[in-house]
Image (cartoon, grey):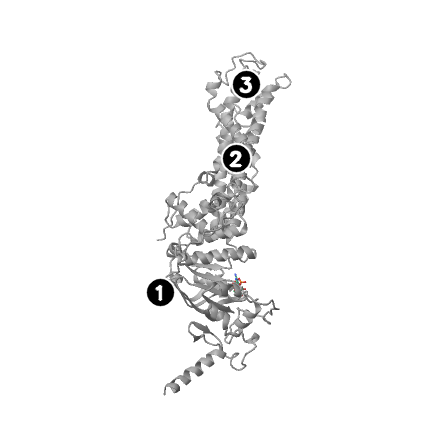
Amino acid sequence: MTTIRLRRPRMAWLRTGQLGFLTRSPRATAGLVIILVMLLMAIFAPLLTPYDPKAGIFDPWLRPSLTHPLGTTALGEDIFSQLLYGARLTLLIGLMSGAIATAIGTTLGLAAAYFGGRVDEAINTLANVFLVLPGLPLLIVASAFLRGAGVWPIILVISLTGWAWGTRVLRSQALALRNRDFVHAAVASGEGPGRIIFREMLPNLAGIIAANFFSTALYAVLSEAALSFIGIGDVGQTTWGTMLFWAQGKQALLNNAWWWVAAPGLSIALLGTAFALVNFGIDEISNPRVGRAGKATKVLRKKGTAPVAEAPQTGQPLLSIRHLNAGYLTPRGPVRAVRDVSLDVKPGEFLGLAGESGCGKSTLAFAATRLLDAPGVVFSGEARLDGKDLLAMSPEELRRVRWKDYSLVFQASMNILNPVIKIREQVYDAMQAHGVQDKKKLDARARELFRLVGIRESYLDAFPHQLSGGMKQRVVIAIALALEPKLVVMDEPTTALDVVVQRQILQEIDEVRRRLGISVIFITHDLSLLVEMSDRIAIMYAGEVVEEAPADEIYRNPKHPYTRRLMSAFPPLSGERERREGIPGRPPSLAQDIPYCPFYERCPSRMPGLCDMKKPASVEVEGGHRVACFLHSMAVKEEESRAPLASD
Ligand SMILES: Nc1ncnc2c1ncn2[C@@H]1O[C@H](COP(=O)(O)OP(=O)(O)OP(=O)(O)O)[C@@H](O)[C@H]1O
């Protein structure tokens, strides 16, 4: 049975201490103070006034005085007492209706987005039906029928007619979130569904949920006032709405007792304003860009130059990919983006993977690490990490090894950072999902990681938007290194960054992987960069690895005609500036079978009748230098056929 580790979900602002921030937002503070004062007035009404709100024991139409701060009604009741006691039911109606409608709306909206399919369809249909139900006529009918049943009919009708809007909005927002990179990354890092919904998605929806709550609460307060005002509902109860009803019925304004109308009317308006103000505050929390949380620090600290320790080379590959076939199932048939690829990565090795765009580099990396999403599919093959076949693992086994044994950084990795969660929490996440819970250890490790990738520790308490693109990418690299995985796959991790930052980050990656003895698969179009960084380079073309050799060997002595053209398409590392040429022609479509040399059409050294008839096998031409080209496999064969003669 699959067990999912779930931490107790807590709302984001409680966890990150952002509730404190709420009180630092002047608007939210004002809103909270108003609501709190009203709540206190409601709770402590018996202490604040000695009079029963329904006791008509005083002279009617008394003007405001010290004994009766808001005067008396036409029936001789104390208006101030009515205002205090009325707050009880008015607040109860608002807060309860808001809470029930928001709970139903949030649960159904999130369930629809997360589970999709039939669940989504059913919830959506239900929400559509409830959206067209006319709320006010229903309220009138329910109140008329349930007259005398107190305020609960109103609360229930408002809750039941008010949840559908929230579900609609939350569903669409949650659907968009479901496809965001940070949610994919959370899935990839082994987080369970509950944790993803509550930890990753819910905080991003806090603004909408709050808006839903406060707008329903306000709607409820206003509806109750409107119903009471026109005499529907239980006018025997004391609420701000029934106060307005009686004031109107007894013609308070004509009797110059404007305070009888003004007191409940202004209280309702003030409550609405308070709801709106707190709503603004929560919007600031849920969207840190709006707020002022955290101080952005400006200067990057230069990293120390600690001694470098190479990983022990055991000779056994850490990752061993064998006959891997992977691709995409499309309506026009399968695209075979990775074709019978076999590749090894040794412990501590930096393997560069290069090739033109669309040749299958990313598909290879994602397929081998079981991160290929639909419509991607692994057709066949093995990918053994430390002897364990990743492609045969159960989802639970995979969850255990991901991030711990291997991790991934890709081009748009900075998007995996959840915009509403502080960097520190996100660095902790991967470690917590794998059992590190001790706060001191988490903090020490997070600081160490930041030093390692050259970011000031103070950025741990920043939000992602406070960091530049380069820094976010460093954070992601730090997260990828958090559990000291044996292998990190980096798919163009710096392509989106400017050249200076790229170089800095690459140097840091190189130093970190040497220091920690981590193996790296580094994917890029930039062959000259790979030559500089890699121990070994594999060149891919049309889904196949056509050449593989130590980096300096590829640089000095490229053998495959494609590698040679690729090398000449990039500027040399040093020397005169000269005009570079691209490779004429286009790679073949990966939707078709290619039972011959895939480079045939573009190859300047092609041999018709051979290269267009069958596929060259990959052969070792020199120690560790393999190439899949007839030019070289023939030379090897000749060499081999001469060898016995020489020994005769
Ligand atoms: N979702 C998809 N559906 C169908 N085909 C796809 C899909 N994703 C990628 N492909 C195809 O698979 C092939 C390999 O793509 P892949 O992204 O692995 O190449 P790449 O070498 O990493 O390219 P780049 O360097 O531009 O990222 C391409 O022909 C591409 O069009």
Residue 465 x, y percent position in the rendering = 54, 46
User: Which residue is tagged 1?
Assistant: 314
Q: Are marks 3 and 1 in contact (CB under 8 Å)?
A: no
Q: Earlier in the sequence, mark 2 or mark 1?
A: 2
Q: CA distance from mark 2 to mark 1?
A: 69 Å
> Closer to the camera, 303 or 568?
303
Residue 158 tag number: 2
Q: Earlier in the sequence, mark 3 or mark 1?
A: 3
Give the residue type that dot 2 points to.
Ile
Pair 3/1: label in front: 1
Give the residue type that dot 1 points to.
Thr
User: Can residue 545 be seen from the camera position used here?
Assistant: no
Callout 1: helix, strand or loop?
loop
In the drawing, does residue 379 fall left or right of residue 252?
Answer: left
User: Which residue is tagged 3?
Assistant: 79
The quadrant the C terminus occupies is bottom left
Callout 3: helix, strand or loop?
helix
Determine the residue positioned at 44% across, 56% down.
512
Q: Are marks 3 and 2 in contact (CB under 8 Å)?
A: no
Pair 2/1: label in front: 1
- Compared with 502, 321 (above or below) is below
Callout 2: helix, strand or loop?
helix
